[in-house]
Amino acid sequence: MSYNLKQSTPKILYYKINTEETKFQNKIKKPSQKSTKMVNIRVTDEEFLEIENKSKMAGMSKTDFIKKAVKEAVIYNIDSKIVEKIVVLQERINQLEVGEKKQANQVNSEFNSIKDDIFKMLGG
C-alpha cells in the first residue's frame, strides 16, 4: 500500500488546524451549567460512524459535537396549509395543456402568491 503525502496533507492540515482551534475555544469557554439530563438515541452503524468521524475531525467529543449540532440547527416551520396549496397547484399545473394560457396564468399567479408567503415566513 503506497501512501501519498501530497494527497493527505490538506486533510492533515485541516484536522490539525481545526483541532487546535477547537482546543483554544474550549479553553476560553464560559462556565456553563452542569449537564444533568441524559438522552438515549438509536442510530445505524453508518450514522454512528459519521458522528464519530465528524466529531474527531472537529476535535470534539461525540456529546459536545451533538450538542453543538442541535444548538446550531436551523428549523423552518412552514404552515401545512401552504404545503397543501402547493401540492394542489402542482397537480393543476401538471393537468394544463399548452393552449390553456388563461388558466396557466391564473395558476402561476396563485403559485407566486404562495411562494411569496413562504419567503415571508422564512424571513426573506
Image (tube, grey):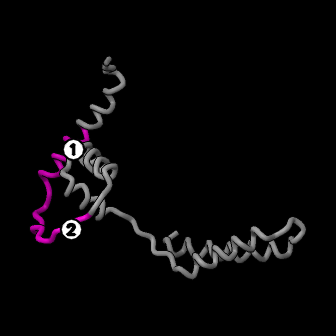
Percent x, y of residue 20: 19, 41
Residue occupying the point 52% across, 79% down: 79
Which mark sits nearer the N-terminus, 1 or 2?
1
Give the image quarter of residue 105.
bottom right
Q: Is residue 120 magenta?
A: no
Q: Dot 1 surroundings within 10 Å: few (below 14), some, or many (20 or more)?
A: some
Q: Is residue 7 above or below residue 31?
A: above
> Pointer 1: what residue?
21
> Pointer 2: what residue?
39
Percent x, y of residue 73: 35, 63
Amino acid type of the residue that numbered disc 1 sits on in the rendered structure: Glu
Q: Is residue 35 magenta?
A: yes
Q: Dot 2 surroundings within 10 Å: few (below 14), some, or many (20 or more)?
A: few
Helix, strand or loop status at disc 2: loop
Which residues fall within the magenta stretch? 17-41
**Side of 54 where 120 appears, left or right:** right
Q: Nearer the viewer, residue 65 or 72?
A: 65
